[in-house]
Amino acid sequence: MISIVIPVLNEGATIRQVIKTIKKTSRKIEIIVVDDNSTDNTVEEAMKEHVRVITSSQRGKGISMREGMMAAKHDIIAYVDGDILTYPDNIIDLLTGPIEKDEADFVKSYFERQAGRVTQLVAKPLLSILYPELSHFQQPLSGMIAARRSFLSRVHFENDYGVDIGLLIDMHHLGARITEANIGKVENAMQTWEQLSKMSREVSRTILRKAENIPQENLETLGNINLIREQMEYAILESIDKLQKMVIFNLDHAVFTQSYLQWAAVAFDQEERLQDINAARHNALTTMELSATIFEGRNIAEMLEVADAIPLVPGIREIVRELKKRGYACGLMTDGFGTVARHIKNKLGMDFVFANKLHLVNSVATGAFTVADYFLKDNEYCKSAVFPYIAQQYHINTQNIIYVGDGKRDSQLLAEAGIGVAFCPQYRGEIVEKVADKIISGLSLAPLLDIAPASPAKFKLPAISKKQARKIGMGSLVGLAGAGLIYFAMRQLRNKKEVTC
């Protein structure tokens, strides 16, 4: 069988057609879409084709390619781009045929289109100087390739425009048998001059860095090439600045039906170790640091596979979709890791993530762990410190935030949020009754839609104190005649809080 990896970034308009074309192959295949933290509907569209979708741990095509390889189950792996609608129906056969016939270890595609400007003006001239044995390849920057896993696992995936030329050079260094495959006529969007300039710098930088021996007589020629050596920044700043209201879901207690950490401990045979960590009763920060060591040596594909195996709260996608229609930014908060949370965020079509950082080297966890700055208050771990951070960064007042989490563990967040919703709290007692504005029992978040106002452009809670709010009494909705808006009462009498589903 063959694994097909499709790295994508904001390709919602084309990804389904690409997948449908790939499925026309006569080979037995699996398809893995690796989302590079898209901000459009790419993930939703890909999932409609019933393929596996994972989220890359860091933005960049090279990382997506490498992590797609990690997730792949088979020895032959093919990569195709997710934005090309003119692939031939037998694109996979063309790419993988030489490998299946044991004629090649690495297949580089070329197609019926004039080679791009960066290929002609940068890549080929440099290859002719440094790697003359590779200069005959018609389109060395083509991203449609296939290779044996045994070779791919030994190459370095550049994380910029240099990834495709870098793979070609690395395969050559490894002694792989390399051949070309004509995949017919391919049309893709023309790049801007700004993109071409960036591409030329990164391609030339990759070729030079991988060159083992540069002939002395060519140093002057190479010295005339302007290289930018600064690394690209791939951190994503979520586009929520125009939204005035927000819903934050606790990942482990309002999205997953089970704890991610516990599931991972089972999957990685670390149950006893986790039990020992929890039994020691360390403070929260120490417990999280020790828990992170459970993941040492595990790659991102393994960690995301655990996340995909955990059942989600029924109807969560529909709830998020409706909340976003009502103008809410929706996101996740977790004591765990951003790599996992971003993957679930993308699968659910959410907008942001607040999480800690698990350190990865070459997409493999080191066991080290860093707490997010927005979870620290006076050098102590305090998740509610995220509220002033949100106010500063996104100009969203804490009163306009609905927080959905567990009653006991999230008591401070539930108390400080504009509306604190305890969802299926594990412990029903005085703490939950005091701090939560609403308690939802039963495995459904549908009552959340009764809490979140449906239409106002700007959502502001009434300027009343908690003491005043408790006197509102039986009614759960308060009509404000002058404004014509409906607001949810901030507090109700303790014996009227519970909503059953």
Image (cartoon, rainbow, N blue to C red):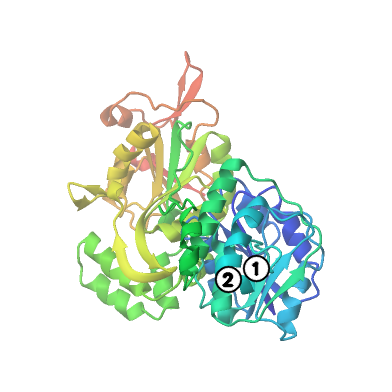
* Residue 408 figure quarter: bottom left
Q: Which residue is mark 2?
A: 131
Instruction: Give the amino acid type for the residue marked by disc 2 in the picture.
Output: Tyr
- Mark 2 → mark 1, Cα distance in angstroms: 7 Å
Residue 372 in picture, x, y percent from top left: 31, 52
How dense is the environment of label 2, judged by Cα within 10 Å: few (below 14), some, or many (20 and up)? Answer: some
Residue 489 in picture, x, y percent from top left: 40, 31
Q: Residue at x 59, y 56 (%)?
A: 122
**Label 1: element kind:** loop
Q: Which residue is mark 1?
A: 135
Instruction: Give the amino acid type for the residue marked by disc 1 in the picture.
Output: Ser
Query: Which residue is most to the top?
Result: 482
Residue 464 falls left or right of residue 322: left
Residue 174 in picture, x, y percent from top left: 54, 81
Q: Residue at x 64, y 76 (%)?
A: 147
How dense is the environment of label 1, judged by Cα within 10 Å: few (below 14), some, or many (20 and up)? Answer: some
**Label 2: element kind:** loop
